[in-house]
Amino acid sequence: PSVISEKGLLVERAAHRLPTSIGRCCQSCHLVMSFRRLSRLAAPVSAGAVLLARAAAPPPELAECSYDVRRQGVSSGMHIELQKLRPREEQLRRKWEEDEAGFHKLPPRAWPPVQPKPEELPALQEAAAAADAPPQAQFDLATCLTFNNLDPVDGLRRYRELAKSGAGSLRQDAAVAVATVLLEGIGRDLEEESTAEGVSLLQEVAAAGHAQALYEVGVLHYLGSVPQLLAEDYGRAYACFEAAAAQQHMSANFMQAELLIEGMGVESDVAAAVPLLVAAAERGHRMARQYLRDFWDADAAQSGVAPGGSSMERARVFAQQLPQVPLGGSEHFAVFRGDGAQSSLAELLAEAASSDVVLLGECHDDPVAHHLEAFLLISLAAVRPEVVLSLEMFERDVQLVLDEYLAGAIREKDMLQDARPWTNYRSDYRPLVEFAKACRLPVVAANAPRRYVGAVGRRKEALQEDFAAVEAWPQQVAPFLPPLPLPAPSQVYMQHLMADPEVLGTAVGRTDPELVAEAGADLGREITARGSVGSPDLTEQSTTERRQGECPYLGVNGRDGLLAPVLLWDATMALSIARALQARPEALVVHVCGYFHCEKRVGIAEMLSAYAPQPPSTLVVAMYPEAECHAFRPQHEGAADFVILTDASLPRSYDHSPHEE
C-alpha cells in the first residue's frame, strides 16, 4: 500500500466501480476481514491504506471460513441448528447456485438501499427541481451523482444540506452518506480532517440507533484503522454489529456471526452464529451462503452422510436428533395393544418396520398425535430403505403440484396456493412433508377431490355406475377416483359406519340388520336415501355440537348423510396406497388419516385387500385423545393393532370454528 498513491487508487476505483466503502456490499465483509488479517503484520495505517487493502483483497468466492469446520468439527449445538435447515437445504443450494450463475461483476452497493443508475439522472434532476419535491428526491439525486461518480462534489453538497435541514431518518441517512463520502474520499482526496468529521458523524448517528451507522462504527472498531479516533475493540465492534443486526442489517448479521465464530469480543459460539448466517444468506450475502454450505457438508460428513446420500441415510441424520421420547409412554400419552395390554413405541416400531403399510389414525386436532406421527415417520425412514408418505390431507388431483414442490421446481407459497391444504397444514402436517422433501421421500396425495365427494353426498346415483358411463361425469374424472363399483363393504364395516350418527345423517346411530344386508348388496343405496338431505334431527344440529376433532376436509355438511362419501374416501385412499405399493414393491407406506377411516381394521384397511394384487401386511395404529390417557377404556378394545391414548387436556392444534367451514 505504501507505494500506491491514494489518488491513483481513486482513479482505479472510479474506472471499475469497486465498492470500496466499508460493508457496502455483500463482499465487503470479506474485504474487512482480509484487511484485519493484513493489519496484524503492520502498524496502524491511514484510511487510505484501508482502501488499498480492500482493493488488494481476494474475491469473495475464494474466501474460506476462518473457523476450520472440518478440523475443529461440528458441535452438537451446531448440528441441531443445521438440522433445522435440512428440509430447505436442497432448495436453498439450488437457489444460491442460480443467483450466482454467470456472476461476472461485483454486486451493487448495499447502502444506500436505492441505487439510481446513471441513465436515471435527467429524471431525478427534474423531480428534485419541482417546487413540491420531497426531500427523498434530493437524496436520490445526490446518490446518483455521488456513487456513479457523475458529480460527487454536488452530491456531497446535497447530502450536507439534507443532514442539516432534513428530519427524522432521512437526516440520519444523509449524515451517514456524508460520512461515507468523507471516509472513502469519493471525489476528493482523503484528509485527516475529513476522516475525523466522518467518524464523528457516524458516532453521532449510531448513538441514535441508525443501523448503517452502527455497522460502520463496528467495522472501524473491528479494523482499528483509525486508532487516533476509534480504538481497535472487538467487544465494541460486536456490540455495534449486534445492534445493527437486530434491525435486519445484512452485513451486520454476517459480521456478528463472524465474531461469534472466531470468539472475538464475545465468547465463541458457532451454533449461535448459524441463525445469523441464515438471516444474511436469505438477504443475498454470498459469504454467509458459502459458510453454510461448508457447515452443511462438514455436518453431513461427520454424521456419516455424504451430500446427496440415500433417503435412509438422510433420515438417519434426523433420527439421531430426535428428542428423547419415552418409548413406554409419558405423562401425555400411553401405548396399548388392541386388547388393552400395556405396550410401547419400541414394540410398535418393531412391528411397523416389518410391515408393508402403516395406517396412522388420528384425531385431526390432536397435537400429541401429530408429534408422534413425525417421530414414527422419521424413525421408520431411518430403518427402511424405501418409505412413502401418504396423506388424507391432499387430494389426488393435486399430486402434480405436490411433486413439483418436492422436486424443488416451485415455491412453497405456490404449492400452498394450488394444492388446497387443510386449515391446519402449517402446524400439523407441514413437518411431515418437509421431512419427506429433505429426505427425498415420495408423498402421495391420497384422497378423493372434495368436489366429487360433495357431489356423491348430494346425488346418491353417483356411485351406482362407472364414472365414465354416467353422463354427469366427464371421462377425465377417472384418474382421480377409484373404478366403480366400489368394493362391497363387509358387514363389520357397515356396522362401523352406521354406528356413527353423522354417517347416516341421523342423530342416533343405527345397526338395523336389514339395512346392513341392503348395504352389503348395493353399497348402501337405500341407506343413503333414507339418511340424506332432510333428516330433521341433524338439520337442527349446530356446527358447534359436532364431535371434537371434526375433519376440516368435509365437502358436504352433515345434513347430506356421509355414507357414500365415506365409502368413496376410504376406497380412494386404499387405491392410492395400493398403487404406491405397486410402483415401489419394497417400500413401506405410512398413511396418515382420521382414525375413523382405519379403526377396527375396516375402511382403508379392508379395501386395501381389494385393490392390492396381494394383501399387504398392514399395521393399524389408532390415536385417541382422552382425559385420562393412561387408563385403557373398553370402547377402544379391538380398535387397532396398537392404540395410543393422548392427553386431551392439552390445547388443540387448531380451532375449527364454524366460520372456517
Image (cartoon, rainbow, N blue to C red):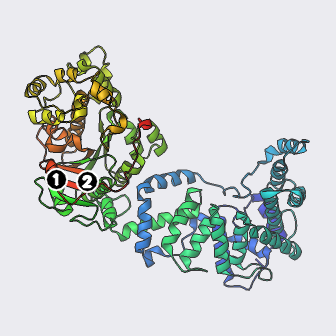
- Crowding at dot 2, Cα within 10 Å, few <14 / some 14-19 / many 20+, comes out as some
Can you tell which quarter of the image residue 298 is in?
bottom left
Residue 223 image point, x, y percent: 70, 77
Q: Please identify the quadrant where the C terminus is shown.
A: top left
Q: Which residue is mark 2?
A: 626
Residue 29 image point, x, y percent: 64, 68
Q: Is residue 477 left or right of residue 219?
A: left
Secondary element at image label 2: strand
Q: Tell which circle, 2 or 1, labels the residue nearer the N-terminal end.
A: 2
Q: Residue at x 14, y 32 (%)?
A: 494
Q: Which residue is mark 1?
A: 633
Q: Observer-nearest residue: 646 or 489?
A: 646
Q: Observer-nearest residue: 512 or 285?
A: 512
Q: How many marks?
A: 2
Q: CA distance from mark 2 to mark 1?
A: 9 Å
The amino acid sitting under disc 1 is Arg
- Vertical side of 328 occupied by 592: above or below: above
Residue 562 image point, x, y percent: 25, 29
